[in-house]
Image: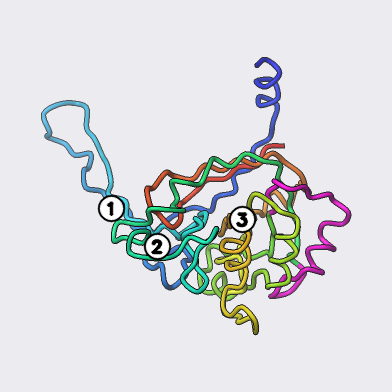
Amino acid sequence: MTELSDALAGAQFYDLEQPRYAGAPVWPAHEPGVLLKLHRRHEAGLGEARTSASALLVMAEHSGTHIDAFCHQAENLCMHGGVEVNAQVQTPEGFTELGTDTIPPLFARGVLLDCADAGRAVGADDLERAAGGLEIAPGDVILVRTGTGALWEDPEAFLAAGGIDASGSRWCAERKPLAVGADNVAWDVPDAVDPELGSLPGHLILLVREGIYIIEQLNLEQLAADGVREFAFACLPLKFRGGTGSPVRPVALV
């Protein structure tokens, strides 16, 4: 325990979550994203010196920095592991299988692949070049910087930026990571259509076919600026029963 506490005391932490606020970039299907309104306020004349404030929070699962659960996507109405979409699995209150509550806490070795110079579509060749001989082992978490995270305060530019194409998703899947993540809106190139897989091909490859979690809308700018390529990665999804995704606050420790 002493060695662990000493290591943590000397570690540098990188916060990989983007700030959450009304008007932040969000995939159009998940608008309005985040709404926070005070329903109790600090006010004078309430009878004692102590006062309270608290807010109502309304948030789409897939707004801001978040992780996708395996029930988020299906192929021919079949989810990861052969789970069929039917009325017993997909209910008005959420999913009875593969929901957010089944995502474990993610603690793993993380690797950063900086592909900010790759253009709008990051492919397998770009990832291979960014890895530069860095070994990626099964169970690692692969984070891809496209440079989109620097556009967070400009929603229009952020949503119009690129992502990872089908070849890049296959490249990642071949390495059998625990999870992948990127700094753009949806991992995939938002408006691209793959001739074989259709829209969002990475979601089919990773979530449905391979059982690899996807973390989206990460803030990887400082990690890249400091030249960090390997780190300890921690990410704790909220335990929403039956949810299709969860906001997260991932961190890298070096």
Which residue is situated farthest in the right direction here? Answer: 133
* Mark 1 / mark 3, whichever is N-terminal: 1
Q: Which residues are magenta?
A: 117-142
Q: Are marks 1 and 2 in contact (CB under 8 Å)?
A: no
From the top left corner, tell me how far across and down residue 76 is, in percent. Answer: 50, 74
Which residue is drawn at the image coordinates 53% and 53% (left, top)? 18
- Up-down: is 47 above or below 62? above
Which residue is drawn at the image coordinates 46% and 71% (left, top)? 77
Q: Amino acid at mark 3?
A: Ile
From the top left corner, tell me how far across and down residue 213 is, in percent. Answer: 58, 55
**50 displayed left or right of 195:** left
Residue at the spot of label 2: 33
Residue at the spot of label 3: 212
**237 displayed left or right of 210:** left
Closer to the eye: label 1 or 3: 3
Which residue is drawn at the image coordinates 81% and 60% (left, top)? 130
Which residue is drawn at the image coordinates 80% and 67% (left, top)? 126
From the top left corner, tell me how far across and down residue 143 is, in percent. Answer: 68, 54
- Up-down: is 202 above or below 210? below
Task: Kindly state the secondary structure of the residue where label 1 is placed.
Answer: strand
Label drawn at residue 154? none
Residue 230 shown in magenta? no
Task: Kindly state the secondary structure of the residue where label 2 is placed.
Answer: loop
* Crowdedness near tag 1: few (<14), some (14–19) or many (≥20) residues, C-alpha within 10 Å: few
Closer to the eye: label 1 or 2: 2
Label 1 to label 3, Cα distance in Å?
Answer: 35 Å
Q: Amino acid at mark 2?
A: Gly
Label 1 to label 2, Cα distance in Å?
Answer: 13 Å
Residue at the spot of label 1: 37
* Crowdedness near tag 3: few (<14), some (14–19) or many (≥20) residues, C-alpha within 10 Å: many
Label 3 to label 2, Cα distance in Å?
Answer: 24 Å
